[in-house]
Image (cartoon, grey):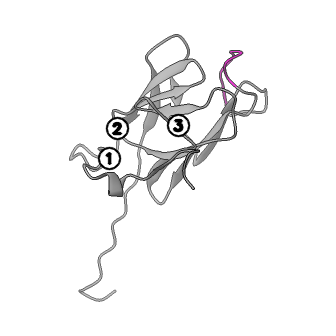
Amino acid sequence: MGPAQRVLIRVIVSANLVALSEGPNLPLDRPVLLVGRHAECDLQLNSGKVSRRHCVIATVNGKLVIRDLGSTNGVRINGEPVDEGFLYHGDEVVIGNFRYRVELGDDPTGRTARPDSPAEAPVHSGTDS
């Protein structure tokens, strides 16, 4: 690697969804987690407002991403409905009728904080063409 090349490696040491309403805290302890009410899901949320296979939460290139799997009641990040979006420390996530706060414990310097620029934090909704 030459002197002009820099590689940023961000490792999420610990990540959790902390319950803000009823429901369990969810440890995000694997690279890919299926969330829903079906028995095969990695994280089970037992509610009629949660689809059998509601969403997937994954670590992709050092960032935490959530993707709705066509659920009936959707996924929201900070109040906005999304098909897919990045999750940052302090974000509020709604899955069905469960509300969570994202807690990422990798970096006290704030690199896991939501970027100021919307261009740096793409969120894809079902209304995009």
Which quadrant is the C terminus positioned in?
A: bottom right
Q: Amino acid at mark 1?
A: Thr
Which quadrant is the N terminus positioned in?
A: bottom left
Q: Amino acid at mark 2?
A: His
Of 70 and 52, nearer the camera is 70
Q: Earlier in the sequence, mark 2 or mark 1?
A: 2
Image position of 2 (left or right of 42): left
Q: State the mark number for residue 28.
A: 3
Q: Residue at x 24, y 86 (%)?
A: 3
Q: Amino acid at mark 3?
A: Leu
* Badge 2 vs badge 1, beta-carbon distance below 8 Å: yes
The image quarter containing residue 102 is: top left
**Above or below, 36 relative to 29:** above
Badge 2 is on which residue? 89
Image position of 116 (left or right of 25): left
Q: State the mark number for residue 112.
A: 1
**Above or below, 124 relative to 105:** below
Of 80 and 30, nearer the camera is 80
Instruction: Write the start and end of the magenta stretch as one range.
Output: 43-50
Within 10 Å of disc 2 (Cα), the crowding (few <14, some 14-19, many 20+) is: many
Q: State the mark number for residue 55.
A: none
Marks 2/1: CA–CA distance: 6 Å
Marks 2/3: CA–CA distance: 13 Å
**Above or below, 24 relative to 6:** above
47 in magenta: yes
